[in-house]
C-alpha cells in the first residue's frame, strides 16, 4: 500500500448508518418504499423556513455574479460574522464581535478545525462523553491526537462526573459536549454545565494549562417543552462553539456553520489564528458564498420544530405502549431505546427482518441501546408500529 493507510481505511469503510440507509433503498426496490421503515439518518425532513428561499431569490436579483458567487474572505464575509455576533448578543446577552467567528462548511468542519487548533502531539487527548457522534473519533485522530471516551450515564444521559474526573490528566486538551444530544436526545442542564465548568477549572489549575470545552451545537434550536439549552460560553471561558445551520435551517447539503472563539478564551487571538491556520491547511476557507449571505439574513429563523415534537410524542407514546424502554428526548430528533437483548447489533439485525431500519448505538459508545431517528414522515411512524410490535413479541 503506497497510500496513506489511515485515509485508505476511512475511505474504504462506509459508516454503519450509511450502510443501513443504502440497504433501505435496495429493500424499497424489492418490497415497496411504503413497507420499509427507515429510521437510520438524521436528514431533516421539515422544510427550510421561507426566509431561505426568499433570500436566495432576492440575492440572485440583487447581486452580480462576483458578489454572489465569488470568493469571500477566508474566514467568511464581514457582514455574515457581524450578523451572527449581533444575533447571539441579543439572544444570550453576550458581547461577541465579528472577529470571534470563522465561517465553516458545517459543524463537521468546525470540529475538525477545533481539534487541529487545540492539539499539537499524538499524546494530546480529547475526551468525548458517551453516547457521542461517531465522527468525533475520526476528526480527533485525523488531527493526530488521541480520542478518549467517558462511559454514558444511562439514567439521565447527563455526564458521569466521577468517570470524567478519572479520565482527565495532564494530556487532556479538551472535552467535547453535544447538547441537545445525538443520539440520546438529552439536553445538558444548567447544573451539569456548572459542574463541568467547576471540574475543568479545578483541573486547569492542577495541570497549569487550559482544558477546553468544545461545544458541538447543530441541534441548539431543536429543543422541546421550553427546556433551557445553556449557552456554555457564559459558564466557562475556555469554550469553543461549533455551530451548524444543517438542522436549524434544514440545510445539511449546503454545508454552512461557524466556529466561535470567544475573547475570554486563553490567548484567544492566537487561538483564532490557529483555527484560521487549520482552515487554510485543510482547505476549509471561503465557506459557500451564497449560503453565507442566506444565514446573514436568516439569523433567528428555524424550520418548524413543532413538527419534530409531534413526531417525538407519536413515537415515544407508541413505543412505550408496546413495552419498549425509551429515554424521552428533550431535543434533537433521535429516540434512544434499550435493545431487547444485550447485543444491540443483533437486535438491529432482527429489526431488519421486519424492515425496521434502526441503528445500534455500539458505534456511539453506548452498547445495549439503539437510535431511532424520527426526522421522518409522521405517516411512516404510524405505519411502523406493527413491525415494532412484532419485533417486541419475538422477544417475549
Ligand atoms: N455533530 C453532530 C452531533 C451531528 O449529529 C452532526 C450531523 O448529523 C454533525 C456534528 C455534523 O453536522 P454538519 O452537517 O453541520 O457537518
Image (tube, rainbow, N blue to C red):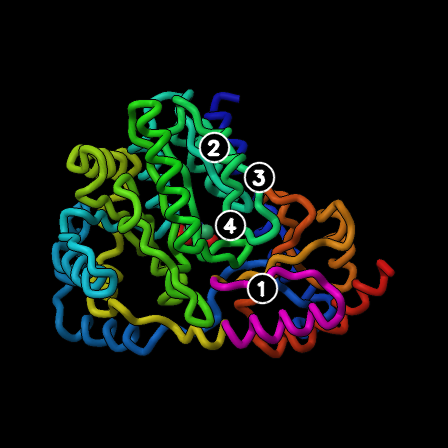
The Cα atoms of the two marked residues, 1 and 2, are separated by: 27 Å
The Cα atoms of the two marked residues, 2 and 4, are separated by: 14 Å
The Cα atoms of the two marked residues, 2 and 3, are separated by: 12 Å
Tell me where residue 16 appears, x and y as whole percent. 61, 47
The reply to whether residue 251 is visible in this rendering is: no
Q: Which residue is mark 2?
A: 165
The Cα atoms of the two marked residues, 1 and 3, are separated by: 20 Å
Tell me where residue 212 appears, x and y as whole percent. 33, 37
- Which is closer to the viewer, label 1 or label 2? 2
Q: Quadrant of residue 51?
A: bottom left
N-term mark: 3 or 4:
3
Q: Is mark 1 within 8 Å of ligand 1?
A: no
N-term mark: 2 or 4:
4
Residue drawn at (48%, 70%) of the image = 45
Q: Are the residues tagged 1 and 2 within 8 Å (C-beta)?
A: no
Dot label at residue 328: 1
Amino acid at each position: 500500500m503506497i497510500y496513506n493507510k489511515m485515509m485508505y481505511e476511512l475511505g474504504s469503510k462506509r459508516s454503519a448508518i450509511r450502510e443501513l440507509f443504502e440497504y433501505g433503498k435496495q429493500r424499497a426496490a424489492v418490497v415497496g418504499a411504503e413497507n420499509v421503515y427507515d429510521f437510520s439518518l438524521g436528514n431533516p425532513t421539515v422544510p427550510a423556513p421561507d426566509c431561505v428561499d426568499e433570500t436566495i431569490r432576492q440575492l440572485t436579483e440583487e447581486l452580480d455574479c462576483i458578489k454572489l458567487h465569488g470568493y469571500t474572505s477566508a474566514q467568511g464575509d464581514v457582514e455574515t460574522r457581524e450578523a451572527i455576533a449581533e444575533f447571539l448578543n441579543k439572544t444570550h446577552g453576550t458581547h461577541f464581535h465579528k472577529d470571534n467567528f470563522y465561517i465553516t462548511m458545517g459543524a463537521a468542519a468546525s470540529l475538525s478545525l477545533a481539534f487541529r487548533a487545540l492539539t499539537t502531539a499524538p499524546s494530546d487527548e480529547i475526551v468525548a462523553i458517551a453516547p457521542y457522534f461517531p465522527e468525533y473519533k475520526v476528526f480527533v485522530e485525523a488531527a493526530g491526537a488521541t480520542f478518549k471516551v467517558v462511559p454514558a450515564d444511562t439514567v439521565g444521559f447527563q455526564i458521569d462526573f466521577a468517570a470524567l474526573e478519572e479520565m482527565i490528566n495532564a494530556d487532556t486538551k479538551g472535552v467535547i459536549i453535544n447538547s441537545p444530544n445525538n443520539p440520546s436526545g438529552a439536553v445538558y442542564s444548567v447544573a451539569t454545565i456548572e459542574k463541568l465548568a467547576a471540574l475543568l477549572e479545578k483541573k486547569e489549575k492542577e495541570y497549569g494549562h487550559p482544558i477546553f470545552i468544545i461545544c458541538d451545537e447543530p441541534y441548539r434550536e431543536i429543543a422541546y417543552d421550553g427546556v433551557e439549552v445553556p449557552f456554555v460560553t457564559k459558564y466557562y471561558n475556555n469554550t469553543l462553539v461549533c455551530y451548524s445551520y444543517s438542522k436549524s435551517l434544514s440545510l445539511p447539503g449546503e454545508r454552512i456553520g461557524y466556529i466561535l472563539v470567544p475573547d475570554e478564551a486563553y490567548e484567544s487571538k492566537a487561538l483564532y489564528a490557529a483555527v484560521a491556520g487549520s482552515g487554510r491547511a485543510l482547505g476549509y476557507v471561503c465557506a459557500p458564498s451564497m449560503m453565507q449571505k442566506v444565514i446573514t439574513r436568516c439569523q433567528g429563523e428555524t424550520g418548524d420544530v413543532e413538527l419534530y415534537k409531534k413526531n417525538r410524542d407519536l413515537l415515544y407514546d407508541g413505543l412505550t405502549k408496546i413495552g419498549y424502554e425509551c429515554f424521552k428526548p428533550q431535543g434533537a430528533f433521535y429516540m434512544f431505546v434499550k435493545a431487547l437483548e444485550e447485543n444491540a447489533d443483533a437486535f438491529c439485525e432482527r429489526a431488519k427482518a421486519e424492515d425496521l431500519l434502526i441503528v445500534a448505538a455500539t458505534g456511539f459508545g453506548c452498547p445495549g441501546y439503539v437510535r431511532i431517528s424520527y426526522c421522518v414522515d409522521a405517516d411512516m411512524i404510524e405505519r411502523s408500529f406493527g413491525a415494532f410490535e412484532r419485533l417486541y413479541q419475538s422477544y417475549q
